[in-house]
Image (cartoon, rainbow, N blue to C red):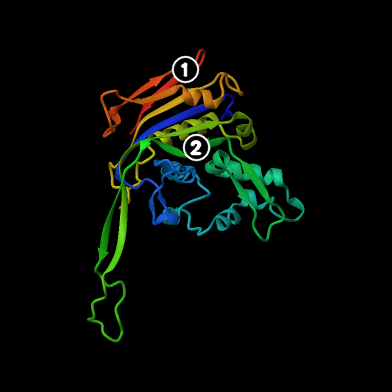
Amino acid sequence: MSVLDHKIDFAVVLSVRNANPNGDPLNGNRPRQNYDGYGEISDVCIKRKIRNRLQDMGESILVQSDDRRNDGHRSIKDRVDANEAVKEYAKGKNANKDLYALAACQSWIDVRSFGQVFAFSGTDVSVGIRGPVSIHTAVSLDRIDISSMQITKSVNSVTSAKDPDKRGSDTMGMKHRVDFGVYVIYGSINTQLAEKTEFTYEDAEKLKEALRTLFANDTSSARPDGSMEVHKLYWWEHSSKMGQYSSAKVHRSLDIKLKEDIDQAKSYEDYIYDLIPLQGLDVQIHEGL
């Protein structure tokens, strides 16, 4: 496998309908919104979904969700300690930061993609790895409307020892959702960092597939099947390590506007999606799952 030798930029256009794409724990788990009223999905949330998709594709993942663990390890440290290739360079006379980092990158695709900080007690090395794949916070094209409903749980969570037949009081809660919104994720792959983590072109292709199928196997009560959908993946491959254009200029070349006769978007088709040509730089356009 060859280390990636040319810069890549990408953009993902997705829609949300009657779902909570990324709840804010500091705001009652309401969908994230910036101060201007536009919806947001954090880069951390997006990377979590990418990791899940790569794990579904059979890749080794270091940062696994607890409910998706497939190796029996309950923490990142346990997973690292169980890896003999990494453990060899963790302490003693063989302690070596560079070899430790290289072994970690070779072991887990999310480490060589996004990077990772390794700072655990009981080791003689502390390593920070910068990954080549950068993901922006996704932002909606227009301000979003958030609907809230009150929900009730009327089932006993536990039985009272004194009165097993006693019915517990109803528990009240709130559930929030975005009525509709189209969001765009922007990202890039840096070749200089790819060389350091040995991120390959094959890894880039796996990332592309993970982005294209981002919401497969991602069902929850907040995100029912079909409520979130990837419509288009735009993938620009430059001809050099530095790239012919900056990532900002490439991302701006995707011009999305609301149709003139539409006051408020109700569907993905209510927008016009144009690409401003950049000389010498072609774009691949992939349909979502």
Q: Quadrant of residue 6?
A: top right
Q: Is residue 170 depicted above or below 50 in this figure?
A: below
Q: Residue 271: x and y, percent?
A: 32, 27
- Quadrant for the C terminus, please: top left
* Amino acid type, label 2: His
Taking 8 as reference, is 77 above or below it? below
- 240 vs 44, left or right, is right
Quadrant assignment for the N terminus: top right
Confirm whether residue 262 shows in the render. Answer: yes
Q: Kindly identify which residue carries mark 1.
A: 282
In the displayed structure, would residue 239 be above or below residue 25?
above
Which residue is the site of mark 2? 136
Instruction: Pinpoint residue 54: horizontal percent, then vertical percent.
Output: 45, 41
Give the spatial CA distance, label 1 vs label 2. Answer: 22 Å
At 50% from the left and 37% from the top, the residue drawn is 135
User: Residue at horizontal 30%, vertical 71%?
Assistant: 157
Q: Is residue 144 left or right of residue 249?
A: left
Label 1 crowd bin: few (<14), some (14–19), many (20+), radius 10 Å: few
Q: On screen, 248 above or below 149?
A: above
Q: Are marks 1 and 2 in contact (CB under 8 Å)?
A: no
Q: Amino acid at mark 1?
A: Asp
Among the 4 quarters of the image, the one containing residue 106: top right
